Image: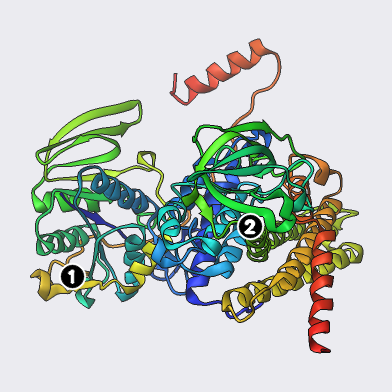
Amino acid sequence: MNIIVCIKQVPNTISVQIDSGTGRLKRDGVESIINPFDEYAIEEGLRIKERVCGKVTVVTMGPPQAETALREAIAKGADEAVLVSDRAFGGADTLATSYTLSLAIKAIGSYDIIICGKQASDGDTAQVGPGIAEMLNIPHVAYVKKIESIDNKSIKVERMMEDGYDLIESQVPVLLTVVKEINNPRIASLKGKMIAKKAVIKILDAVAIGADIKKTGLNGSPTQVMKIFTPPQRAGGEKFTGEARDVAAALVKRLSDIGIV
Amino acid sequence: MVMNYMLSEEEKMMIETARTIAVEKMKPVRKHYDEKEEFPWDIVKEFAQADLCGVYIPEEYGGFGKGIMGLVLVVEELCKVDGAIALSLAATALGTLPILIAGNEEQKKKYLPDIASGKKLAAFGLTETNAGSDATGMITTAVKDGDYYILNGTKCFITNGGDAETYTIFAKTNPARGARGISCFIMEKGIPGFEFGKKEKKMGIKASSTRELVFNNCRVHKDQLLGKEGHGLMIAQATLDNSRPGVAAQALGIAAGALDEAVAYARKRVQFGQAIASFQGIQHMLADMATEVEAARALLYASARMIDSGTEKRTSKESAMAKLFCSEVAMKVTTNAVQIFGGYGYSREYPVEKMMRDAKITTLYEGTSQIQKNEIALNLIKEFATKSK
């Protein structure tokens, strides 16, 4: 079974700042980590491999330094790593990223399962995973919290919902985005880290994946950030005090005044 | 910030891996295991998965091949968070060293890979009720019967007892010969006549099991003998030369962890309108603690490097110095950490009281501080005598 895990290198959100001029994240000098949700995607890929045999290929689109994230994934047990990197990919929104990654996945070759974290901790859009599935014309299931069963033809998963979960069966190949409830990611082993140090990371550029550079990077991104700001803090609520009877009456009156009841 | 000890990239890798497990996996459960006195199997699995169990075992037997220094770095880092949970790994090293030191190729191939992978834990069985500092006082016997030895007797205070699969056991094969009449055997859990007795209730290191091993006409094949008959005590001494830095690392880790807690608390705790870290009385305590911890680390790393270099035949003196100094520092530093926390330090709500309880054992097992001093003095005098000949 060929398993592809898409990951993203993100700034460690504990220390992130926003450039007030451009509205973008200030990435210089900020420690980079694997997007926390992608850690669950890597772990689930490894678990599928351990369950049914196969190969885990981890893919990221990013600048050359994103290689660090790929080596971390190899240290945890991924078999191969591909860095999709080209100046023409810079400044991509979710549409251009989905396009680029879908071409990269085609270039890698055959796949049965593609796994992504449910969203990235910097953009928080949750669009790239489903976007890749659309471009590849395969089904996807988002917010997967458990893989019930899996074989070469089909997969049964639990999709987390607000009020419970859906049990979904899908054909393979399929793309899944996973939530943190799905597993408890392992810590990279010493031998894994030694392998990661020496691993050769394959680099794919725009030519290698046959990308139309009008559809990649800034050129291919309809999304434009107009303004970014910190929303004002919510003011404290109203407090009613006094006898229970009076408080209840006052509360009902207030709620009906603002049209809630 | 620690001083620069010229650690290799692989050594830093081991520290980083141990730190991740300590902080992410051990810290959330350390209180649970201390209070419930349960064996920390969940964490042992993490050690195994991350390849920490075999850091000191040569690569040809499935380990990471980083010697006593590797063991020291990992144990120190884990013990900064919890000195009891980490003991499952450190005591396994103690039980494994006799095989590394005296085992033949077949024995090494048979036992080391499972220990290196963390599939099995090991334990060291020397101590008896009336044979502590004086190991020659043991009464467990191994009587030869054809191709077998028959063991009878009881070992006590055995760390990992009952939870380990592989045991290195010392018994008298020739009681008349005293120190030269002791032999060492590899024994596996589950063989007929090998049972587990009383489990100790202890002051600290509660997440570690300490148990009696009972041998009742227990038959063990002669292939399980380590080294030659009668060489047991020499194997035990060589083992302790290599393992005492492990105890020293445990002590150092506990001390370093307590120091971190004390500094953080002193900066946060406000009395008389200011953080207590601004008082010179507290500052001087912290300064002493930090200096002692760093001195302990320097002595320990130097001893571990000396052992690994293999340039000296015996390193009894240096191992004893590291163990003596680190364990006494651990007791001083943890006691002062409790002092800095004041009444809160005495409460189980905060981690320093546990660190103080856990630290005490390091001045006792694998030789008390007094025994370490005997060892140091004896070797000092011997070296001087050799030089002046």
The Cα–Cα distance between marks 1 and 2, rounded to whole angstroms, is 81 Å
| Residue B183, above or below A252 | below
Amino acid of disc 1: Asn
- Name of the residue lying farthest toward the top: A245
- In the rendering, which numbered label is found on residue B230? 2
At horizontal 67% and vertical 58% (from top left) the residue drawn is: B233
Q: In this picture, is A68 found above or below B355?
A: below
* Amino acid type, mark 2: Gly
Q: Whole-percent x and y of residue B307?
A: 62, 74
For residue A219, the mark is 1
Q: Is residue B232 left or right of residue B50?
A: right
Mark 1 neighbour density, 10 Å: few (under 14) some (14–19) many (20 or more) = some
Q: As rendered, which of B224 and A189 lies closer to the eye?
A: B224
Q: Is residue B66 above or below residue A141?
A: below
Q: Nearer the viewer, residue B142 or B115?
A: B142
Binning the other alpha carbons within 10 Å of mark 2 as few (below 14), some (14 to 19) or many (20 upward) gives: many
Residue at position x 57%, y 61% in the image: B74
**SS type, badge 1:** loop
Residue drawn where x is 52% and y is 57% of the image: B20
